[in-house]
Image (cartoon, helix red, strand yellow):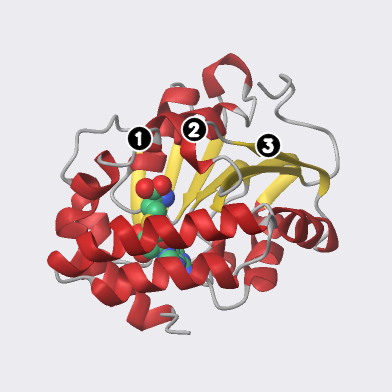
Amino acid sequence: MSLLRDHDLARAFDHASRTYDSLTSLNPGYHTDLLRSARRLGLPDGGAGLHLLDIGCGTGASTRALLRAAPRARITAVDASAGMLRRALAKPWPARVRFLHLTAEELATAGEGPFDAVFAAYLFRNVTDPDAVLRSVRSLLRPGGRLTAHEYSLSGSRVHRALWTAVCHGLVIPAGTLLGDRALYRHLWHSVLAFDTAPAFAARLGRTGLTSVRVAPVAGWQTGIVHTFLARNGGTPTARKDEQ
Ligand SMILES: C[S@@+](CC[C@H](N)C(=O)[O-])C[C@H]1O[C@@H](n2cnc3c(N)ncnc32)[C@H](O)[C@@H]1O
């Protein structure tokens, strides 16, 4: 399998950053699904007084969803790709939102945090050691803080696996090839097949010591292909509103 990791993956995203927003806008539900996952954090009072972290923020689509779900929160958004970050920074943001060029692996020692909630959209499948990143996320979360991971993680059904491969070969990889980003979009296909199924990722979250782990589906054609994962860092909750 042709998986890209670390520096190679960041360079591939640097190149793809030029067309990333155009491609994702062709995916029906991309932004709606991100918003629904961000709202599933259940942050009270529009996030007033809370500090949130968006890991793997890319061109800012997930950051925008987080901001809409918690318009009064302070948000730190990080990404490994300078090119993706440049696209994010070119957009208008309130002063409460800041972007940092940091990898998920660097976060624990970067002196950032603690955070009341962490959002990670399409990140974990891309990292070399998801357990290490999850341990780091846990160390950055306040007691009771919440993690929402929005991820391509297959249900385990052969139908969803076949549908994913059909969409990649019929649409995603040809479009990516035309744009000069074939390696990245083949990585997207392979990385989803190679990553945990939704039950396996939920179990991984539990093994890291996160509690109250829940999995929720997304709507539309990505049902069974993308899931929202919700978990808590034990302790007293800072986010009390029930998940939606
Ligand atoms: C598929 S994009 C998703 C971007 C954004 N979250 C969204 O929902 O549109 C994945 C992003 O994760 C970033 N990424 C991948 N591995 C990373 C890592 N180890 N640390 C930080 N960012 C990483 C990539 O650079 C890319 O911008």
Mark 2 vs mark 1, CA separation in Å: 8 Å
Query: Could you say where residue 176 lies in the image, as x and y percent from the top left?
Result: 23, 64
Type of amino acid at the residue the image marks with label 1: Pro
Q: Residue sitting at 58 percent across and 15 percent down?
A: 45
* Residue 93 in which image quadrant: top left
Q: Is residue 70 visible?
A: no
Query: Could you say where residue 119 lies in the image, as x and y percent from the top left?
Result: 54, 44
Ligand 1 occupies quarter: bottom left
Quadrant into which the C terminus falls:
top right
Mark 3 vs mark 2, CA separation in Å: 13 Å
The residue nearer to you, when weighing 147 against 186, is: 186
Query: Could you say where residue 41 lies in the image, as x and y percent from the top left?
Result: 63, 31
Callout count: 3
Q: What kind of element bears circle 1? A: loop
Type of amino acid at the residue the image marks with label 2: Gly
Reply above or below: 153 against 51: below
Residue carrying label 3: 216
Reply above or below: 186 against 85: below
51 sits to left or right of 82: right
Mark 1 and mark 3 lie on one chain; the one further toward the N terminus is 1
Residue carrying label 2: 220
Badge 3, how many Cα within 10 Å: few under 14, some, many 20+? some
* Residue 2 in which image quadrant: bottom left
Q: What kind of element bears circle 3? A: strand
Type of amino acid at the residue the image marks with label 3: Ala
Say the numbered circle drawn on residue 28.
1
Q: Residue sitting at 52 percent across and 28 percent down?
A: 36
Mark 1 vs mark 3, CA separation in Å: 19 Å
